[in-house]
Image (cartoon, rainbow, N blue to C red):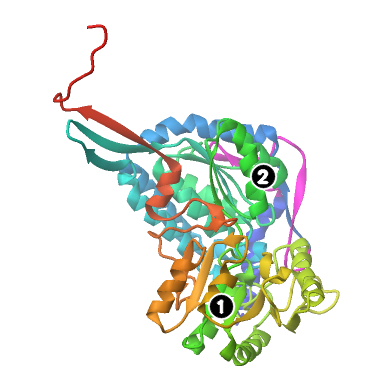
């Protein structure tokens, strides 16, 4: 009887057939189309460095076709009753769940993320569509703001065609996190997925079309960020750009959209602190610390990549941590036993490994890991989960986003120092606080320069809550009605009650 791992490998080979038979194209105006340029690029495997498939590199004609289709489809989609958009988006969720295995296997194969985490990708993506589907009927609703002689009320209306540019780390779920509220609001979409993990974006486009999303409402253009992505952010038909990725790229997108006054929503980088006080439940804190940096290969924006531990418990806590890190299972992403898989691309692997030399040059210690994993010459972007100790917050390993399974441990003496160190970075996405002292927990949470703070918990997603960062970690918030604030315009309507005096001129 075949093992689960062997079954996953066989499923992957079967699913890859369609992508190997012909280059991956785009999905524009309701159908899959090849690129209008003959230029292709290779989608490389994080597992062995080989070519998974070839992809059409979108050019100006492809981007214009997608943006024009979105512009043409917008009036009818925006005018569709919210109850009908709700029905269609629930059918999208059904379609996602029906293809859950396909999504999980391809996502794991394409991104290097372990199947133990990607097995939930479809479930979480479906939740995104259902959550915003249920809010579609009320998306246009506003407030009643009566005055003495006038009645004011607000309504919201869809913004127009929007660009959604998504990253390579957990691409399917993050795509739905942006696309679902845009469609629920009545916007049309042009999606540009990351070139390092493009496969599942086509699955989502197919699922939406099969669920009844009209032609032109949801479009997909594959390509390179500096080419197709730039063309999309500059296109005059696109009214807003929702982007998840690096802070530097966010700055470029803001500049590219400035001439056409595009609205932007950015979820960018992070150098998130997890603060462990000496009165914390140290067993639970240890579990959370390990999970929040080494799960998903350390390749997620909310990873807690700086560990701040109170001095009195620092050495003992770090020793326990090092033992756990050394036991983390590195392996093939389709193996259910794997806890850390290969990083998405060799270029990214080299970046992550470069910080080991940087750490040592700055005087820190590579306590665990810091080297490639796997047998020499076998290929693949595998790295041993890494722990840096003997560090302080001025080191580059404490200031720069590494975006891999790498943790930097820093001691602190008291609450004031913990807050000062936590805030002393360019980023401000998330923070984590571990203490049994309720007053201290709230004091610290209020003082942290972070858009989200979890107390005595790992990252826990609750869809109605705002998700986003401060400083270099982003602009705007996702989640609940916060998403509609981005994808919709708010209009005030003032109705006179005929009881006020109208000023007269020339009477």
Instruction: Assign a secondary structure to mark 1.
Output: helix
Can residue 380 be seen in this snapshot?
Answer: no
Instruction: Assign a secondary structure to mark 2.
Output: helix
Q: Is residue 379 left or right of residue 211?
A: right
Q: How many marks?
A: 2
**Which residue is labeled 1 in the image?**
291
Screen quadrant of the C terminus: top left
- Where is residue 140 shown, x and y percent of the image? 33, 41
Circle 1 residues within 10 Å: few <14, some 14–19, many ≥20: some
- Where is residue 256 shown, x and y percent of the image? 65, 38
**Upstream in the sequence, badge 1 or badge 2?**
2
Q: Is residue 151 left or right of residue 365?
A: left
Identify which residue is drawn at 66% across, 49% down. Answer: 249
Q: Residue furthest right?
A: 377
Screen quadrant of the N terminus: bottom right
Circle 2 residues within 10 Å: few <14, some 14–19, many ≥20: some
In the image, 484 versus 335, the foreground residue is 484
Magenta segment's dominant SS is: loop
Q: Quarter of the image holding residue 331?
A: bottom right
In the image, 121 versus 474, the foreground residue is 474
Identify which residue is drawn at 54% across, 77% down. Answer: 275
Q: Quarter of the image holding residue 153?
A: top left
- Where is residue 356 shown, x and y percent of the image? 78, 74
**Which residue is labeled 2 in the image?**
252
Q: Is residue 456 left or right of residue 491?
A: right
In the image, 491 versus 95, the foreground residue is 491
Q: Is residue 226 above or below residue 98?
A: above
The range drawn in magenta is 22-49
Identify which residue is drawn at 20% across, 36% down. Answer: 147
Q: Are marks 1 and 2 in contact (CB under 8 Å)?
A: no
- Where is residue 97 shown, x and y percent of the image? 45, 61
């Amino acid at each position: 009887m075949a093992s689960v791992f062997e079954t996953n490998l066989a499923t992957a080979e079967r699913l890859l057939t369609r992508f190997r038979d012909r280059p991956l194209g785009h999905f524009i105006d309701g159908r899959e189309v090849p690129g209008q340029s003959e230029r292709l690029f290779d989608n490389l495997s994080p597992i062995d460095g080989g070519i998974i498939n070839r992809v059409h590199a979108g050019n100006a004609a492809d981007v214009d076709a997608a943006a024009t289709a979105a512009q043409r489809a917008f009036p009818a989609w925006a005018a569709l009753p919210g109850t009908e958009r709700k029905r269609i988006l629930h059918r999208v969720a059904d379609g996602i769940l029906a293809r859950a295995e396909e999504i999980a296997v391809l996502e794991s194969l394409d991104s290097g993320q372990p199947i133990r985490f990607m097995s939930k990708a479809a479930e979480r993506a479906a939740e995104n569509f259902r959550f915003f589907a249920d809010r579609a009927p009320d998306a246009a609703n506003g407030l009643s703001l009566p005055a003495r002689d006038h009645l004011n009320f607000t309504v919201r209306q869809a913004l127009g065609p929007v660009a959604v540019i998504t990253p390579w780390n957990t691409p399917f779920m993050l795509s739905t996190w942006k696309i679902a509220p845009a469609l629920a609001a009545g916007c049309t979409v042009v999606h540009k997925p990351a070139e390092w993990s493009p496969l599942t974006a086509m699955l989502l486009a197919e699922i939406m079309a099969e669920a009844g999303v009209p032609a032109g409402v949801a479009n997909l253009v594959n390509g390179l960020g500096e080419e197709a992505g730039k063309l999309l952010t500059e296109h005059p038909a696109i009214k807003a750009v929702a982007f998840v990725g690096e802070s530097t790229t966010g700055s470029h997108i803001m500049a590219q959209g400035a001439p056409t006054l595009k609205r932007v929503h950015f979820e960018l980088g992070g150098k998130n602190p997890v603060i462990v006080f000496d009165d914390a439940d140290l067993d639970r804190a240890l579990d959370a610390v390990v999970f929040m940096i080494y799960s998903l290969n350390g390749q997620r924006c909310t990873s807690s990549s700086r560990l701040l531990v109170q001095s009195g418990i620092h050495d003992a806590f770090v020793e326990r941590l090092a033992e756990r890190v050394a036991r983390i299972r590195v392996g093939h992403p389709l193996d259910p036993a794997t806890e850390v898989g290969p990083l998405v691309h060799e270029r990214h692997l080299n970046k992550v490994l470069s910080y080991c030399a940087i750490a040592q040059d700055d005087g820190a210690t590579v306590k665990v890991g810091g080297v490639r994993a796997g047998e020499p010459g076998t290929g693949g972007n595998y790295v041993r989960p890494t722990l840096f100790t003997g560090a302080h917050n001025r080191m580059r390993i404490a200031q720069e986003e590494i975006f891999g399974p790498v943790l930097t441990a820093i001691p602190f003496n008291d609450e004031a120092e913990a807050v000062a160190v936590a805030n002393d970075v360019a980023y401000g996405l998330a923070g984590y606080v571990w203490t049994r002292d309720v007053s201290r927990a709230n004091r610290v949470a209020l003082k942290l320069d972070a858009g989200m703070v979890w107390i005595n918990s790992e990252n826990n997603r609750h869809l109605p809550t705002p998700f986003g960062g401060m400083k270099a970690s982003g602009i705007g918030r996702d989640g609940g009605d916060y998403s509609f604030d981005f994808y919709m315009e708010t209009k005030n309507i003032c109705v006179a009650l005929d009881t006020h005096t109208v000023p007269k001129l020339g009477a």
